[in-house]
Image: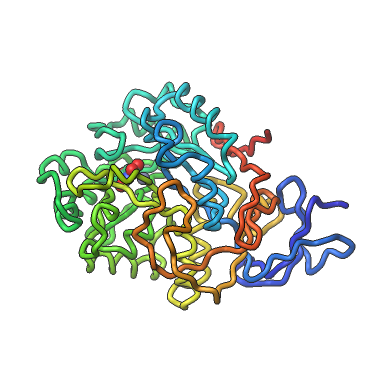
Amino acid sequence: MPYDTVYTGNFYQNGEFEKLAIGVTGGKIARIAKAIPGERAIELPGAVFPGGIDTHVHFRDPGETQKEDFSTGTTAAIYGGTTTVFDMPNNLSPITDYEAYERKLGIVRRKAFSDFGLYSMYIPGNGSVIHEDSASLKIYLGGSTNTVGIGDLGNKDSKFLNDFGRPVVFHAEDEECLKSTKQEPKSLREHNLYRPERCEWKAYDTVRRLALTKPVAAHVSSIPPAFDFGNILQEVTPHHMLLHDSMDLGPWGKVNPPLRDRTTQERVLTSFLDGRFFMVSSDHAPHAEEDKLEFESAKAGIIGVETRLPILLALVSKGILPTSLMAKTSSENPAKLFELKKGKIDIGYDADFYSVDLKKVNRINQERLHSMITASPFHGFDAVFPQYVVVGGNVALEKGEMIEDHFGQYLSFKKGRVENEQE
Ligand code: DOR
Ligand code: ZN
């Protein structure tokens, strides 16, 4: 047996579907052929795509595992066709130094069913103690869950960030601007007004001034004048594309940056459909019921790691979203950003796939999601869920049911080069 496994199916490769046989060795694609005779193959039904990559999740592990841990978070990811996640550093004790990163890695690595990378949080002055494995650095220009605003960034910061050589992801809401507005919103509408679009645009100005080589704006919720992002890559979320502040979502729709008004939301969606944004991430940010009781005091965050791809796939199924744009923004572009051999069906690439029946549109039922907290503002939305998911050459989801006997790999980004660390 030259291959560990052979998968056959209708694979999405270079913008087209083709019936292929894929030989997998050591978790990587070793051969692509019309057929590989003499080998027992696993047939993946429907359309087969490279595994989803979600570069923005908050799995709360360690610190708030009553909201999510790495086991439930990555289970939800796999049920949604996502085979790689990047976890944010705003744990209850934020990941700002080497020890905190190591401690977190030690806790989460044996719970991950999908591949994963970890962020560190950059605050001016902590450059020398940041873990060199970090997939990326997150900078909160404005306060949000478990963060504080960080004040001014200068040339020294730019130099460190560029020398570090990894993408730098910004929570782009300007702290001074946020402080100048009213607080304690009572509704989605007020939340939008009190964290206005101009605070987001002001933060883009700050990022542009830093002159970084790989800046990324997390969760773009509105469009700056003249669509001027400079060299900032844009991440958009399903919630900012599909939900707005007139919807009756209560505290479960409270998120930072806020859901905008319908006009802005439609512009964000249209811009995405026109191919103007770089990637789609979920910003999966679970909170417990007691954190979402009163709007004013409710914590901000919406879950989404399991529904991100299925929602996009429903748009593909209805002919609203081109297949190629879905594949690019949910897998191919994130892989390029992080220099991963993922997001593509090609020799030497990781054997991460999901297979779907694009004609099978279902409604999202929050009771059936796999996160620890399942309340979702997307309850009732159309979605296409995967039937099979393969992670690193192993079947992780079979006929829509999770198989829990394989684990994902930790992606270590030492010296700008990704290594898949074998256990
Ligand atoms: O709504 C949000 N929730 N925005 C953030 O920036 C953080 C996130 C969280 O971790 O809860
Ligand atoms: Zn986030």
Answer with left or right where residue 374 lies relative to residue 15.
left
State whether residue 212 is above or below residue 269. Answer: above
x, y percent for residue 100:
45, 25
What residue do we see at 54% from left, 48% from top?
75
Q: Is residue 82 left or right of residue 246?
A: right
Q: Is there any visible trace of residue 408 in the rendered image?
A: yes
Q: Quadrant of residue 400?
A: bottom right
Q: Is residue 338 left or right of residue 406?
A: left
**How many numbered circles does the render carry?**
0
Q: Position of residue 127 (x, y in %)?
A: 40, 25
**Which part of the image, by quadrant, shows the C terminus?**
top right
Residue sitting at x 86%, y 60%: 39
Looking at the image, what colour scheme do you see?
rainbow
Give the percent coordinates (x, y) of residue 142.
24, 40
Residue 45, image x, y percentages: 67, 69
Position of residue 30 relative to residue 269, above or below, is above
Q: Is residue 32 above or below residue 291?
A: below
Query: Dividing the image into four equal quarters, which quarter contains ligand 2?
Result: top left
Residue 231 in sight: no
Task: Please give the name of the residue rendered at 63% of the width and 56% of the height, measured from the top-left corner.
Answer: 397
Decide which of 284, 202 is in the foreground and name it: 284
Residue 331 drawn above or below residue 11: above
